[in-house]
Image: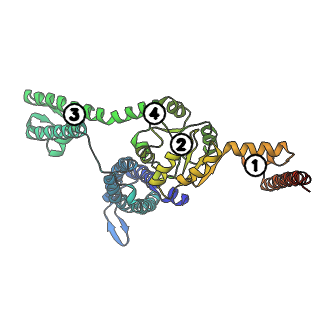
Amino acid sequence: MALSRDWLGARAAVVLTLLVGLLSVVTGIANIGIGSAADFQLLGVTVPGVVRQVTAFTGTLTGFLLLLTAFGLRRRLRTAWYATLFLCPVTALQGVLQSSQLSLPLIGLSILTLLVVGLNVRAFERELSLSTSQIASLSALAGAQAYGTAGAFALREEFDGVETLLDAFYFTLVTGSTVGYGDITPNSAMGELFALSVVLVTVSSFAVVLGVVFTPLIEARLSKALGRMTEEQLDVLENHVLVLGYGDLTEPILEELTGKADVLVVVPEEERARRLSDRGYTVLTDDPSDEDAQQRGRVNVARAVVAATENDAEDALTILTARQLNPEVTIVAAATQRENVNKLKRAGADTVISPAALGAHFLAESALGGEGAETLETRLLGTQGDEEMEAAAEAVEETDGSNTDRVADHGDTDTDSDSAPDE
């Protein structure tokens, strides 16, 4: 189950899409500079050489589009899923038309990505929702480009270098991006006045769009500084261990899980969340027992849930919520008091361990002469071999059995002494 999620899950779809985008850009740039535009044979069909250069150029643009769709997939957008399904065959076809050995990896990876993305249709269900400011900024940019293009083409007699609609669009885009090559210039007062208006309108629209784009990035940095996760970061969580709450056992649990699985810690205190985040842990600041918090922590695709705070009542409520949201997930818990073990199991935990009872048992066995308790503990911490583990377990069992016999013998003696006066 874990292997299939790692290799065929939504995260694999995002990574593969990103790789195809990068490979398409690199392959396109490499093939743009290849030789002449001579005709070539493809499956018995003569293809004009210019097609190779055109597909190399368009392949580079397609690669950049795939990088954008990978970002959309990371946010679980259905629109990005559709776009990826459309662009992957396009990149594969462009690789074929480029007819170069450099294109073979692109073709194979595009087909693989198409299959993996297609299999994860249910993972990308979020609808694309744009804020009012985003819609307004994009509309302003489109309107500014339309104004500059239409005006420059209509006043082409007032400019040196504007003859076609493409020239007019080129002039508007270069002006708005503040590149200003200087190859198209006004030759009259009317042209100069129009150029000034284009500068004001297009540069302003570009600035607004850039502000809207970079604002979420700044918010992400602030969220990290405050120990909070953004929705984009939460969306890519999959096959992770969800640690709900914080207690004395949380630190050693996190140390044991580090490097073995992706971990998300849900804690209610912002200060503690910030400290854990500063140490590199992925943290969500919220109530661990709250249904919305666990849904944001993606308990529905979690590998396991750990509830190990110092409050058995809170852990029971946390376990109940997790079990309701994901009946199949593995839930483990730590009971502060031994009598609460069965209660936590009834709440929905698969495994409940009482650290205090376990430690007390080891100490008692050692005090009564047991020789394997310490070795068994060391093995449980992962520092001994399997043979030593078995020997230690047998030693503890033998000691436990002998102690039981001694207690039984002591009980029989007491019974005999008590019954003697009656006789």
Type of the residue with mark 2: Ala
Which residue is rendered at x = 85% and y = 45% of the image? 368
The answer for how far apart the CA atoms under marks 4 and 1 are is 37 Å
Report which residue position mark 1 lands on.
Answer: 379
Which residue is rendered at x = 40% and y = 45% of the image? 292
Circles 3 and 4, Cβ within 8 Å, touching? The answer is no
Disc ID at residue 224: 4
The answer for how far apart the CA atoms under marks 3 and 4 are is 30 Å
User: Quick check: 322 left or right of 156?
Assistant: right
The answer for how far apart the CA atoms under marks 1 and 3 are is 65 Å
Report which residue position mark 3 lands on.
Answer: 205
Compared to 326, does 368 lie above or below? above
Q: Position of residue 42 (x, y in %)?
A: 37, 68
Q: What kind of element bears circle 2? A: helix
Circles 1 and 2, Cβ within 8 Å, touching? The answer is no
Mark whose residue sits in front, 3 or 2 = 2
Report which residue position mark 2 lands on.
Answer: 313
